[in-house]
Image (cartoon, rainbow, N blue to C red):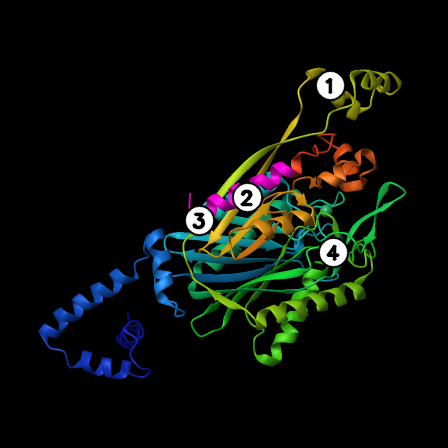
Amino acid sequence: MPLHRFARHLTARYRLPAGEWKDVMKSIRSFNACHYIAAAVLVAGYFWASVPVGLESSAAGGEAAGSKPRAGQLKCGAAETVITRVKDRPEVYADLYARAMVLEQGPRRMAIVTADMGTFSYAYSDVLVDAIHKATGIEKQYILTCASQTHNAPGVDGRQMSATSKTWLAGEMARLVKRASENVRPATLRVSRAPAQIGYNRRLLRNGQVHMAPNPEGAVVPWVDVLSAYDEEGKRIGTMFSHAAHPVIVHGSVDATGPDFPGYAIEHLRKLLAPKGEADGIFMFTQACCGNINGYPLRGGIAACDAAGLSLAHSVTEALDKEHEISPGAVRSRSMTLSLPLQDPPSLKECQEVLAREPDNVRYQELLRMAQSGKRPVLPFPMHAIAIGDDVCILTFKGEMFAEYQLFAEKVSPFKHTFVLIHVNGIGPYVATEKAYALGNRGGYEAWGFMTSRPPYMPFHRDSEKMIHDGIVQLLGALKRGE
Ligand SMILES: [Zn+2]
């Protein structure tokens, strides 16, 4: 380390007044042999103190450290890259991005990776997590790959990435996270929330049947959650913001590839923050519990999407204005997999009757097998959560959770700030509420149509809601207690 940098480090470490490093340097230059031995001891002590400490003690260190980040405390790096070349259509209305934020706390690192993509399948998500793990050494349970679910990119409505694109994207995501990981620097984290709503509940009950249409009475998650990291100079490293709405505002109005409202929100955020000199750093969007919420207006086109993006950007700036710092305690994770029951298949008699008429009906072939087995079929339902210190938790699901689950997690979470993200590390089925399942085949797309038109061919049982609620309470409780 050059002499002047070492002197600066000493002044910072021992909190000498600014500029005093020059005096430190002068005294270093006038050292004799004894001084050099003393200095060597001091240097050794300095590096010893800089070695990342264990998780328990780093949490305690965070408490004591106050607002000033120190070596061995939380570090953060962020990066972004354009991934438009994975497009499956020739036209592009705006570039697709992948973005990464890496947090380092003592020996542990975690990565939040977002992508303007429809979805990632379980299998492909494993490929991504593997590639990121191999490139960075970050433990797999600390890697969150988050697809925005833009409906103008591969991964939705039968839109697919080519095999070449899949291979390229896995490599690019790994390089991206590596870059963010190599750029980590001492950081403070801040969180906040502001009111936000750019969509509506999309389940309208009319004549006893649920239709996909805006339902102003239905549940939404009317806020945006924001997590930001700033370096020692107070410059933004990255800001992750999370809101619950299907990115379907451009969807269908044009076929071209693009990120939908998250892309516009980030563009507007930069414009809104530029006059304050705060536009730098990486901005990234994560999807919250939007299973029953559509961005508004559905298929409204580019201009409408731009306006929705602006509205969300305004909410994020409002949140940024009231951010508060969190103590940088240990990063830890916990998982839980439930076995959720499906609804009972039709009777043996009904299955046989349908198959007599339509012998090639694949759904009824499967339902017959279920009915014959006499066992209630179950689906594995993984849940995962990462805590950052004592106050912040990121609860993640693969499935398309209804807004009600985020409202529930918010109510019961023992953490001060709980982010709830979906489409993380793979896409699972819609997860509706007990009330929605009780409507049976009148329950609409999410509670009936989607689940019955593909494996497993039956929706979740109405008891699922209670089981998931209990699971959330247990998972977050155990994470909070550090079990
Ligand atoms: Zn969806």
4 vs 3, front mark: 3
Looking at the picture, which amino acid does disc 2 mark? Val
How far across and how far down the image is residue 463, in percent?
67, 34
Q: Secondary structure at mark 1?
A: helix
> Is disc 2 in contact with disc 1, using a CB cutoff of under 8 Å?
no
How far across and how far down the image is residue 32, in percent?
10, 77
Q: Magenta span has 468?
A: yes
Q: Residue at x 49, y 59 (%)?
A: 180
Looking at the picture, which amino acid does disc 3 mark? Arg
* Front position in the image: 10 or 211: 211
Q: Which residue is mark 3?
A: 332
Q: CA distance from mark 3 to mark 2?
A: 17 Å
Q: Which residue is mark 2?
A: 473
Question: Which stretch appears magenta?
Answer: 466-483
3 vs 2, front mark: 2
Q: Residue at x 83, y 60 (%)?
A: 300
Badge number at residue 371: 1
> Is disc 4 in contact with disc 1, using a CB cutoff of under 8 Å?
no
At label 3, counting other C-alpha atoms closer than 10 Å, the crowd grade (few under 14, some 14-19, many 20 or more) is many
In which quadrant will I find the C terminus? top left
Q: Which residue is mark 4?
A: 257
* Front position in the image: 335 or 156: 335
* Front position in the image: 348 or 209: 209
Work out whether mark 4 precedes mark 2 in sequence or the reverse, and give the earlier one: 4
Work out whether mark 3 precedes mark 1 in sequence or the reverse, and give the earlier one: 3
